Structure formats: structure tokens, C-alpha cells
Amino acid sequence: MKIAAQYGYQNPVALKSPVKPKQKELSPVEDLALNGEKDARPADVMISQEEAGRKGEGKRKINNLAVPIGGCSAEATRRLYYPTKASLDVLYIFNLKGEAESRARADSRVREVNERWSKCMSESGFRVSVPSSVVSELGLQDALQGQSAIAAAKADVDCKSKVNLVGIYYAIHCAYQNQLIDAQAESLTLAKAQLEDRLRLAASLGV
């Protein structure tokens, strides 16, 4: 509640993040080296390093060295994340997490607690349907730390506590995650092994 009263819906960590310097514009040669040829087909770029090796390098050269398909950026991605055709999609784990979250949000028990939270918010003067859309429903995007945002955030925290929204959602979300873990055990074992290989490769680069 203390954080909500101070920051509203503003992320306090973001307020302390340093401003990133403007990125230097690349020269044509630098752009070619980093991103490869402009007319490269996505089907040629989004392949494993194993397949890229069989296809050969791109047609363009810099200092007599052939530019990799998709440039050095694509080659680095392939070597790290997709060394062989057996490499799992780097987003595989994130997709499973997203699937568990989608199932949890569709669960009748989560919908019911959302309704109780919404009723509580309405009694506090805020007409909102689900916790994830408070900012957009109340039009607070441009004033995340304003007085209205702080008032809404305080009511939000209070209502979540009253209906035990976080506890209920956490338990249901974990249950769906465990279901997916059991169903995808073999692929997750492979994903773990490939992550360990990736970390060893990254450590060996000495940067």
C-alpha cells in the first residue's frame, strides 16, 4: 500500500533507470555486416547454424570475408540459440508460461474473483472490469503517478487484499504450470540441456 500511495501505477524501478544514449547511425558497410543483405529471404535467415553452413555464406563480402546470411547479428543468434535443427525455439519456455497464464485467466475461479474485485473497486468509485486493464479503463496512461492514479492504486491494492485475488490467481496459475510441466517433461529436459550448452558456449567466449 505504501508503494501504491507514493507511485500510483508508475514503475519505481523505471524512474531510476538511466536514459539510454541515442544509438549511432550505421554506415552502409556497418549495416551490411550487422544485418546482412536487404533482400535476404526470412526463410534463409531463420534457420539453424547447421543449415546455414550447408547453404554457404551470403553473396556480399567485406574485406574479402563473406557476410553471413542475415549478417553477423543473425549468425550470432543461430550459433547461440539454434546451432542444430534439433534446437528448440528460444521462446518455447516463454510460450508455455503464456499458455499457463491464458488458461488461468480463463478459469472460472479466476473470473469469479475478478468479479468480486471489480465490485469492490466500484464501491470505491472506480468502474473497472479486470485488474490487468485498470490503467487503460481509467485513462491513466499519461498520469501514472498523478492523484487519480494514486487513489485508484490504493483502492486496487485494498480490494485485491480483501478478495485474496493474488493468492487465488497464484495457486491456479501454478496448477496450470505444473500440468504443462508434466505434459512437456521430455521437451523441458531437452530445453534445460540446451540452455546449459548455451551458457557454456557464452562463457567460453571470454567477453
Image (tube, grey):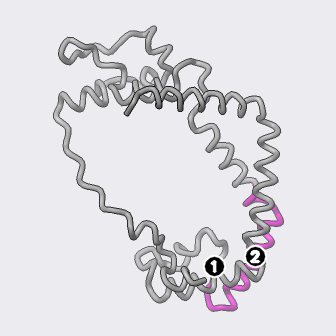
Amino acid under disc 1: Val
Residue indicated by mark 2: 115
Residue in front for this viewpoint, 74 or 188: 188
How far from the left and from the top, in percent, is residue 70?
Answer: 36, 25
Give the Cα distance between marks 2 and 1: 10 Å
Instruction: Give the SS element for disc 1.
Output: loop
* In this picture, residue 150 sits left or right of residue 107: left
In the displayed structure, 140 sits above or below 151; it is above
Q: Few, some or many C-alpha atoms within 10 Å of disc 2 (few <14, some 14-19, many ≥20)? A: some
Segment tinted magenta in the rendering: 104-126
* In this picture, residue 76 sits left or right of residue 196: left
How far from the left and from the top, in percent, is residue 33?
Answer: 26, 26
Q: Residue at x 41, y 27 (%)?
A: 205
Q: Residue at x 77, y 75 (%)?
A: 164
* In this picture, residue 64 sits left or right of residue 104: left
Q: Few, some or many C-alpha atoms within 10 Å of disc 1 (few <14, some 14-19, many ≥20)? A: many
Amino acid under disc 2: Glu
Residue in front for this viewpoint, 198 or 154: 198
Residue indicated by mark 1: 128
Residue lying furthest bottom in this view?
A: 124
Q: Quadrant of residue 119?
A: bottom right
Q: Which residue is drawn at 42% across and 66% down?
A: 14
Residue in front for this viewpoint, 59 or 127: 59
How far from the left and from the top, in percent, is residue 24?
Answer: 20, 45
In the displayed structure, 197 sits above or below 165; it is above
In reply to whether residue 116 is colored magenta, the answer given is yes
Majority secondary structure in the magenta region: helix
Q: Earlier in the sequence, mark 2 or mark 1?
A: 2
In the displayed structure, 156 sits above or below 20; it is below
